[in-house]
Image (cartoon, coloured by chain):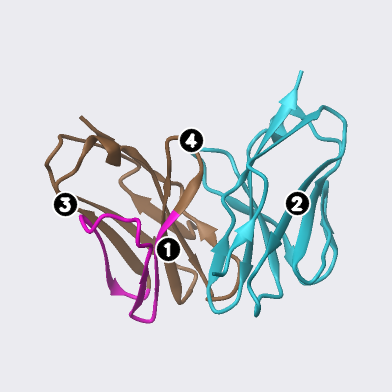
Chain colours: A cyan, B brown
């Protein structure tokens, strides 16, 4: 079955680099999408592609069946849920990773 | 200009009622979606709708039915509302294989 896997939670201290890992089993999917969701607000795209890319503090690594979202200099305001998604003939989302920022 | 809009923003209703949430996108996208933010605040896809092809998440009760009068609209109709239906519902749209753009959400409270 086509699925996208990511950890349910990740924790980090402020100022660190956080890595959220994602892998999938979708044979015809080549692009990764990383979304940010503050619960109750509209989710939004952070970064996407089929190669490593960067948007501000957000870096995306790329392998054929896996990607990591790296958040540089993480801060308390980054505490949210992050979704990984891939696309073959439809978008398939992971279940989301909740980022906790440690005091 | 709002790309993906939902109405109403808040909806409070009694158990057993039937209600609809409307979604409109002005991006010219061909695919629209409905998501439910569950009690643990994670998003779960309910439906996707592309060119009259409806893909249903099998875990969604059949009390929920999407209705698409045209390509720019995908409304969510809910029959016989239950307490457990209380949640935030998000609409989204995309060009089929590309970035999804989400609406601001509709907070449904069933009393």
The answer as to whether the residues below labels 2 and 1 share one chain is no
Please provide the residue range marked out in magenta.
B45-71
Badge 4 marks a residue whose secondary structure is loop
Among the two numbered marks 3 and 4 on one chain, the one whose residue lies closer to the N terminus:
4
The quadrant holding residue B108 is top left
Residue B19 - label: none
Q: Residue at x 49, y 60 (%)?
A: B3
Q: Residue at x 24, y 35 (%)?
A: B83
The answer as to whether the residues below labels 3 and 4 share one chain is yes
Disc 2 versus disc 1: distance between alpha carbons?
25 Å
The answer as to whether the residues below labels 4 and 1 share one chain is yes
Q: Residue furthest top?
A: A103
Location of residue A67 in the rendering, given as x and y in whole percent from the top left corner: 77, 60
Of badges 2 and 1, the one in the foreground is: 2
Which residue in the protein does label 3 denote? B79
Labelled pair 3, 4 in contact (Cβ < 8 Å): no
The answer as to whether the residues below labels 3 and 2 share one chain is no
The quadrant holding residue A48 is bottom right
- Magenta segment's dominant SS is strand
Of badges 3 and 2, the one in the foreground is: 2
Which residue in the protein does label 1 denote? B33
Chain letter of the residue carrying label 4: B
Which residue in the protein does label 2 denote? A21
């Amino acid at each position: 079955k086509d699925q996208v896997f990511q950890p349910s939670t990740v924790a980090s201290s402020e100022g660190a680099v956080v890595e959220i890992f994602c892998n999938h089993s979708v044979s015809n999917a080549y692009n990764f999408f990383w979304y940010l969701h503050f619960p109750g607000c509209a989710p939004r795209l952070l970064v996407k592609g089929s190669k490593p890319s960067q948007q501000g503090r957000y870096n995306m690594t790329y392998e054929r069946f896996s990607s990591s979202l790296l958040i540089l200099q993480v801060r308390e305001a980054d505490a949210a849920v992050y979704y990984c998604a891939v696309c073959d003939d439809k978008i398939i989302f992971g279940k989301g990773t909740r980022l906790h920022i440690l005091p | 200009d709002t790309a993906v809009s939902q109405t109403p923003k808040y909806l409070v209703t009694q158990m057993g009622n039937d209600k609809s949430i409307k979604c409109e996108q002005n991006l010219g996208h061909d695919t629209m979606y409905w998501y439910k933010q569950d009690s643990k605040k994670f998003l779960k896809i309910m439906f996707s709708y592309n060119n009259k092809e409806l893909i249903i998440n099998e875990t969604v009760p059949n009390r929920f039915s999407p209705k698409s009068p045209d390509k720019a609209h995908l409304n969510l109709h809910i029959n016989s509302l239950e307490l457990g239906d209380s949640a935030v519902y998000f609409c989204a749209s995309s060009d089929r294989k590309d970035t999804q753009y989400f609406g601001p959400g509709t907070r449904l409270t069933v009393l």
